[in-house]
């Protein structure tokens, strides 16, 4: 089993996701008690993709997150650094333009996309701030970023219960449904170590994004952050 460490060496994290690619979407559905589908709908609303717009979907994995954008008539590019994820996605949706890429060194020209979005992937980028700057670089002036990421529940008693679930319940559940349960131990630890909502908003601002705001989903288990590139 592959286990990435929290210093997030890219080859370790990519290898870990290669191992879980085949059953990744199913496992997420089980572990989130079906909430991930609701979260993805909220991401699609926030991105607000329009026909002919160019959307970059980072950490797209198998491309499940890219489908809502494609259905609007937008041109969506699913991008991920896990070859295993991309291969599974290509088998399922061969018509999507899957692209291998590292979020800190994106293989796209400046000012290319109307929107850049990343769901449950920023946490796995080795250098978060470099990734946020790269996303700004490839976004056109006036374009937007939408980040969906695990965050910190806002109600203290629930936060305690949630943390216990992550560290105690998640690994045995993952063992039952995932091909690589150790990967989900890493994911639980990385969620606990991730900055809270205001801290992530501050990092977006420092990376150059303007009009940064966020809203909580499921009591702060997940937060949607949005920002814009100055025109």
Image: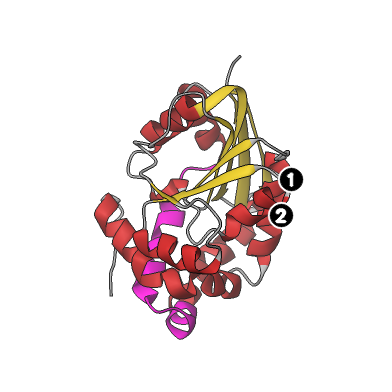
Q: x and y percent of residue 152 in the render? A: 56, 50
The image's colour scheme reads: secondary structure
Residue 142 magenta-highlighted: no
Quarter occupied by residue 182: bottom left
**Residue under numbered circle 1:** 45
Characterize the local packing of mark 2: few (<14), some (14-19) or many (20 or more) Cα atoms within 10 angstroms: few
Q: x and y percent of residue 79 in the render? A: 46, 48
**Element at label 2:** helix
Magenta highlight: main SS: helix
Q: x and y percent of residue 54 in the render? A: 60, 36
* Depth check, front residue: 177 or 163: 177
* Depth check, front residue: 142 or 93: 93
Q: Give the range drawn in magenta.
A: 172-196
Give yes or no for contact between labels 2 and 1 (Cβ–Cβ under 8 Å).
yes
Q: x and y percent of residue 116 in the render? A: 55, 37
Q: Is residue 46 above or below residue 68?
A: above
Q: In this view, does 161 lie above or below 171?
A: above
Q: In what quadrant of the picture does the C terminus appear?
A: top right
Tell me which residue sits at (35%, 44%) in the image: 102
Q: Residue 95, which numbered label? A: none
Instruction: Specify whether 174 is left or right of 36.
Output: left
Q: Residue 41, which numbered label? A: 2
Residue 185 magenta-highlighted: yes
């Amino acid at each position: 089993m592959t286990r990435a460490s929290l210093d997030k060496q890219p080859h370790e994290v990519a290898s870990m996701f290669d191992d879980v690619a085949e059953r990744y979407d199913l496992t997420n559905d089980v572990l989130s008690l079906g909430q991930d589908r609701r979260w993805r709908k909220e991401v699609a609303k926030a991105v607000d993709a329009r026909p002919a717009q160019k959307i970059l979907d980072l950490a797209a994995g198998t491309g499940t997150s890219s489908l809502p954008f494609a259905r609007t008539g937008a041109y969506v590019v699913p991008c991920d650094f896990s070859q295993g994820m991309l291969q599974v996605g290509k088998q399922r949706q061969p018509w999507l333009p899957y692209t291998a890429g590292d979020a800190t060194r994106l293989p796209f020209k400046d000012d290319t996309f109307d929107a850049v979005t990343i769901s449950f992937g920023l946490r796995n980028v080795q250098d978060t701030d470099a990734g946020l700057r790269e996303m700004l670089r490839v976004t056109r002036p006036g374009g937007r970023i939408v980040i969906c990421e695990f965050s910190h529940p806002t109600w203290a008693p629930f936060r305690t219960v949630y943390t216990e679930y992550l560290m105690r319940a998640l690994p045995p559940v993952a063992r039952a449904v995932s091909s690589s349960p150790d990967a989900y131990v890493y994911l639980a630890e990385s969620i606990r170590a991730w900055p809270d909502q205001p801290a992530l908003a501050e990092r977006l601002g420092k990376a150059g994004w303007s009009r940064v705001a966020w809203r909580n989903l499921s009591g702060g288990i997940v937060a949607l952050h949005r920002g814009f590139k100055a025109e």
